[in-house]
Image: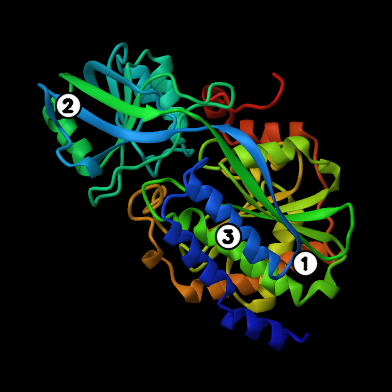
Amino acid sequence: MSDTDWIGETFTSDAGWDHLETLVDIENRMAGSEGERAAAAETRDALAEHARNARLSEFEIQGWERGQSAIRADGEPVAARAHECIALPRSPADEVTGDLVDVGHGLPEEFADADCEGGVVMVRSDVPDWYDRYIHRREKYYRAVEAGAAAFVYRNHVEGVLPATGSVGTADAPIGEIPAVGVASETGARLARRYDGDAVTVAVDCETPEATSRNVHADLGPDTDERLLVTSHVDAHDIAEGAMDNGAGTAMVVELARALAGREHELDTRVEFVAFGAEEVGLVGSNRLARDAALDDVTAVLNLDGVVQGRTLECYTHGFDALADAAERVAGRFDHPISLTPEQGPHSDHWPFVRRGVPGYHVTSETGESGRGWGHTHADTLDKLEPRNFREQAVLLTELAVTLADGTVDPEPVDPSVIADALESQDLAEGMRVTGDWPFEE
């Protein structure tokens, strides 16, 4: 197949975009839900049209089902409309009262200066531009727990009456220690203006049943023990369609399966496509595969989470020079920009592999926004994405996948201590220790 043929077919294909529409129309793909099960089955069937051995692998998870949540002052709701206040997944069910403590962005310095004992701690979802590192939501939550807070309020920085979601909990204790809610930016401003230092009540109602999630797998190329993993996650938060996070990534995996089927003769290494379950509640599906797989056989991980949101792809390469060189080669060949970030990014399904020294990308896209933007809100909907961006990125990612699997790139794994040292040097280790995510021996 000539370049003209495969590029033309990829740019005019509807396979991936049609699957994206299928996923968003399911609406609720929360980990462990019936919707996630349906999305995994649809993804298996879509991959089966282009790849072999399409299958599901099930695993048990801690389930979590949303009820009603509220913030009240003087017995009256502060968030008068339900969409202004939502529980964070894996919050425990509880109702507590304490003085509201506004800790700003939730920086370590701000926590050190605040008296959070017994209080309802509120933090913003962003980090100032001048601060030297990203601070994840869970780090802010567990700093509040360590400071003795009674409850946690996560205030979105994006305007539009959009409460932010995102899970709490750890692998060892999947249900968090204190009730946690997300509120809209405007609700947070109202709380800070009217109730800072005053008693407020946080109430969370939820169920925590046992549940089942599943990973989706399929294969292309020669039947080698070595394999390139091309991955995404099929689950999404229950409050929105999950188009950006991460319907687009899973749809792109389907599109790459279609495109690579036409270039299968170029592959020297088996390509295994995996759409993970339960990413949004602690990378559960990818941790399971990384724990059970023969990692010596994984040549690299090409993880797609956040693609299509912006026009320019962004690749976190985690210090693997061969991965950066491969992406630069693709960008140069097509005269199309790909942004490269060599630093560590421990927050998607590549991470259970990278932390063990396996070469891996996290491929997302540049948006120019602070934080997640529309992600993790009710506004994560299909209308935010453009088919043009999907098709352009499908061409680039197809070529990148072939480059990684045709024998011309041989990224070397590293000892996990190299990853640990990089996390230390990039000031990421402290936060991972706070959240219980530090996987290395001290």
Q: Residues within 10 Å of mark 1 (few under 14, many from 20)?
A: many
Q: In 3D space, how far apart are the residues under numbered discs 1 and 3 (Cα atoms)?
A: 28 Å
Who is closer to the viewer here, 40 or 150? 40
Q: Quadrant of residue 178?
A: top left
SS of the residue at dot 2? strand
The quarter of the rendered structure image containing the C terminus is top right
**Residue at point 30%, 14% (across, down):** 115
Q: Is residue 19 left or right of residue 6?
A: left
Q: Quadrant of residue 94?
A: top left
SS of the residue at dot 1? helix
Instruction: Name which residue type carries label 1.
Output: Thr
Examine the rendering and report whether any part of residue 397 can be seen: no
SS of the residue at dot 3? helix
Q: Which residue is mark 2?
A: 72
The quarter of the rendered structure image containing the N terminus is bottom right
Q: Residues within 10 Å of mark 3 (few under 14, many from 20)?
A: some
Who comes first in sequence, dot 2 or dot 1?
Answer: 2
Q: Which residue is mark 3?
A: 42
Is 16 located above or below residue 204 in the figure? Answer: below
Q: Which residue is mark 1?
A: 403
Q: Quadrant of residue 347?
A: top right
**Residue at point 86%, 53% (across, down):** 226
Query: Where residue 152 sits in the image (x, y, percent)?
Result: 33, 25
Instruction: Name which residue type carries label 3.
Output: Glu
Decide: marks 3, 2 in contact (CB < 8 A)?
Answer: no
Mark in front: 3 vs 2: 3
